[in-house]
Amino acid sequence: MKRIYAFDFDGTLTTRDTLLEFIRYVCGTKLFLCGFLRHAHLLVLMKLGLYPNWKAKQCIFSYFFKGMDMGAFNSLCQQFAADNSQLLRPKGVQRLRQAESEGADVVIVSASIDNWVQPFFPQVKVLGTQVEVQDGHLTGRFLTNNCYGQEKVNRILALYPNRQEYELIAFGDSRGDKELLAFADEAHYRPFCDRN
């Protein structure tokens, strides 16, 4: 039977949330802090379950990147990955490479924007949150649903619809991975966290 390995990215393959790290990398600490203070009320409401996760994330993304040239954004994403390999968990990368060497299909299923996830693993299929572009510039909106919770399962099924034809091995670390881990034949929760 075919084997598919699905890895969450933030917190599972990395030591930190890359949305925060990417914003700080591109904008600097001062603008990063100002932007988050400006949206603190939304983040509090989100944590209380009173404001949708995707909407808060989109507001923050829009604040920092709306209107940016897509080519410039992609260049920043490439540079971010090149300059931040220390964010990756060595044991997680090792497990991903092992899955590849077995000849299995390997995907990264992430709520992060796929533009900056993909450069960390150019050979792996990334199912991430995609951004909307008009006339070569970011609109600040998401083109797809935020790849979080049930959306992770939806993305897997869109790519591999015949569930009875494969074994799914999933790796995650947070509430956003709960549905993916429940859907998998073999689930690993926070497998690399304590061992780096």
Image (cartoon, rainbow, N blue to C red):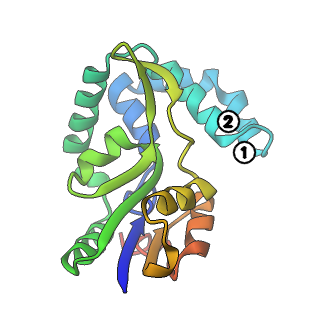
For residue 51, which quarter of the picture? top right
**Residue 137: % across, % down:** 37, 16
| Picture disc at residue 93 | none
The residue where tag 2 is placed is 43
Mark 1, Cα crowd under 10 Å, few <14 / some 14-19 / many 20+, is few
Residue 47's tag is: 1
Q: Residue at x 23, y 71 (%)?
A: 97
Residue 54 visible in the displayed image: yes
- What amino acid is at disc 1? Lys
At horizontal 38% and vertical 57% (from top left) the residue drawn is 14
Nearer to me, 166 or 24: 166
- Residue 167, image x, y percentages: 44, 81
Residue 71 is situated, as x and y percent measured from the top left of the image, at 25, 22
Q: Say which element carries label 2.
A: helix
> From mark 1 to mark 2, how far is it between C-alphas?
6 Å
Q: Is residue 79 shown left or right of residue 39?
A: left
Vertical order, 79 against 127 (above or below): above
- Seen from the viewer's position, the closer of residues 21 and 7 is 7
- Mark 2 and mark 1 in contact (Cβ < 8 Å)? yes
- Helix, strand or loop at disc 1? helix
| For residue 2, above or below residue 33 | below
Residue ID at (34%, 26%): 26
Tell me if mark 2 has few (under 14), some (14-19) or many (20+) residues whose alpha carbon lies within 10 angstroms of its own. many
Q: Amino acid at mark 2?
A: Leu
